[in-house]
Image (tube, rainbow, N blue to C red):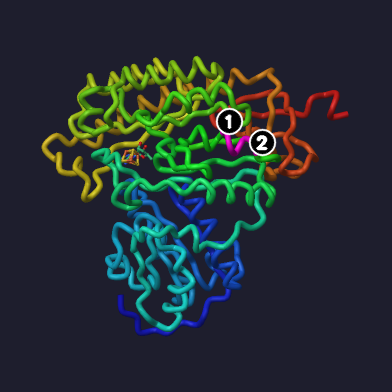
């Protein structure tokens, strides 16, 4: 990347994150870094001196979107802001990005973004500003303290993945599985609660593989961490995502039945219901072992909402394989789900299986059938809430005046009219249900 144009030091910034919740967390941390440098946040890319696009590389569509987004940053007078590409596309494509999009000033990978201020200074001097290192030393120590916090906060506790599912870029873009140390996580959780968080969602690509020694040298898994966080006064809700079936330990399953603050929601991707496809995906679990875990989790916490991820049209997927996916969906009964058409990612083993790629039309048709079934289950799950009184954490203002939006324990969005401040936990009577959200009202005796 060789730049000839010196730029002035940016005074304002705008960060836009795409993809998973880990990127949302990283985006917030980058904003805090820029705040600490004295840059002012603005709500609109057009008004910003520096625009950070925090990108996602998981599927081709997401990765290609970056380039059209970069193009859209050009202003009416032909100028562009200083542009930083962060996230997984930055990691995967590195110096290729400014070669393809000359207006890009900075490329910074997910393990290097603590260096963003240095990179901004370099770019302002017209120097190359690329950092996609994956240092062993953690970036977390170099990040500023957490600032004022919304009621629901993300906290990254684990990053990377050693599972190497054959379709997935994560082991390459986010690197090997690393667990953040016990004390760092507990301290950050305390700081989040002190700053106003009532709920913390622990994040990791394989969050349930999190494991470290605690302060007394005892080995702790995610369940130990959850139990420790449960003792922080003022922290009312704990969630975690994303989990791998193979790391669903007995202790973690038990915690679902024993820790009140641990919300009754489990995102446990299965990807496919066919054993031969699971094998080709290198998932190292079977359909039956997945269902056995779901059964144990439901024994521990009968009202738990199960969520999942699915890929249709994986190379070699036959009609029979796809039917097995529909079967596992019927057997599990999902409250929420995310389903995707297989997307061949450069550098992954499945991208080499070109002799058995599935025709895009067939994959489309399968995706539609799967989504119809999942939507039906999600709607049925939401409808069960009607007529019940539910605990809701108010998280933000709604679009209409007087409207607030909160979350049920089962991660459903709940819309209602109330004057109660954001951050309050209240009882709400659920009156209506849609595929994506619930409508409710304050109980009559309290609304008076
Ligand atoms: N194609 C389609 N979907 C993918 N996912 C990961 N890699 C791919 C790919 N190459 C999906 C998986 C994963 C979710 C985050 O994205 O379902 O769980
Ligand atoms: Fe990707 Fe599989 Fe790791 Fe999940 S477990 S991040 S799907 S390689």
| Horizontal side of residue 82 vs 422, given as left or right | left
Q: Position of residue 96 (x, y in %)?
A: 27, 66
Note whether ligand 2 is within 8 Å of mark 1. no
Q: Residue 435: which numbered mark, if any?
A: none
Does the stretch in magenta take in 347?
A: no
| Horizontal side of residue 185 vs 99, given as left or right | right
- The disc, 1 or 2, on the residue closer to the chain's N-terminal end is 2
Residue at 61% across, 57% down: 146
Does the stretch in magenta take in 229?
A: yes
Residue 131, placed above or below residue 125? above
Q: Position of residue 323 (x, y in %)?
A: 28, 19
Ligand 1 is found in the corner quadrant, namely top left
Residue on which disc 2 sits: 236
Give the magenta-colored segment's residue range: 227-231
Residue on which disc 1 sits: 262
Residue 344, placed above or below residue 293? below
């Amino acid at each position: 990347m060789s730049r000839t144009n010196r730029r002035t030091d940016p005074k304002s910034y705008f960060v836009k994150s795409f993809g998973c919740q880990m990127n949302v967390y990283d985006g917030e941390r980058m904003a805090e870094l820029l705040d600490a440098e004295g840059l002012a946040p603005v709500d609109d890319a057009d008004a910003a001196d520096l625009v950070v696009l925090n990108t996602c590389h998981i599927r081709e569509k997401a990765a290609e979107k970056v380039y059209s987004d970069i193009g859209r940053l050009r202003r009416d007078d032909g100028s562009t802001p200083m542009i930083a590409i962060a996230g997984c596309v930055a990691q995967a494509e590195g110096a290729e990005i400014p070669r393809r999009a000359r207006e890009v000033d900075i490329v910074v990978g997910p393990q290097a973004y603590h260096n963003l201020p240095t990179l901004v200074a370099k770019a302002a001097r017209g120097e190359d500003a690329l950092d996609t290192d994956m240092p062993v030393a953690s970036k977390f120590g170099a990040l500023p303290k957490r600032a004022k916090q919304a009621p629901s906060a993300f906290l990254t506790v684990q990053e990377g993945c050693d599972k190497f599912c054959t379709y997935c870029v994560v082991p390459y873009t986010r690197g090997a599985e690393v667990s953040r140390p016990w004390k760092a996580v507990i301290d950050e959780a305390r700081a989040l609660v002190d700053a106003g968080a009532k709920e913390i969602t622990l994040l990791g690509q394989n969050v349930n593989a999190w494991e470290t020694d605690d302060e007394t040298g005892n080995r702790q898994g995610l369940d130990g961490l959850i139990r420790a966080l449960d003792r922080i006064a003022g922290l009312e809700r704990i969630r975690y995502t994303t989990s791998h079936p193979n790391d669903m330990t007995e202790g973690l399953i038990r915690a679902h039945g024993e820790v009140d603050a641990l919300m009754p929601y489990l995102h446990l991707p299965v990807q496919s219901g066919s054993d031969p496809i699971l094998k080709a995906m290198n998932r190292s679990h079977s359909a039956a072992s997945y269902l056995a875990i779901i059964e144990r989790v439901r024994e521990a916490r009968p009202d738990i909402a199960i969520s999942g991820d699915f890929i249709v049209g994986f190379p070699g997927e036959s009609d029979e394989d796809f039917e097995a996916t529909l079967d596992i969906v019927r057997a599990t009964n999902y409250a929420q789900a995310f389903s995707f058409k297989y997307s061949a990612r450069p550098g992954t083993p499945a991208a080499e299986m070109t002799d058995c790629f599935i025709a895009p039309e067939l994959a489309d048709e399968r995706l539609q059938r799967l989504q119809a079934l999942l939507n039906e289950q999600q709607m049925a799950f939401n409808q069960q809430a009607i007529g019940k009184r539910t605990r809701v954490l108010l998280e933000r203002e709604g679009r209409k005046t007087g409207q607030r939006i909160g979350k049920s324990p089962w991660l459903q969005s709940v819309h209602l009219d109330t004057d109660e401040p954001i951050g309050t936990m209240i009882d709400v009577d659920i009156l209506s249900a849609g595929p994506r959200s619930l409508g409710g009202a304050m109980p009559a005796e309290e609304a008076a």
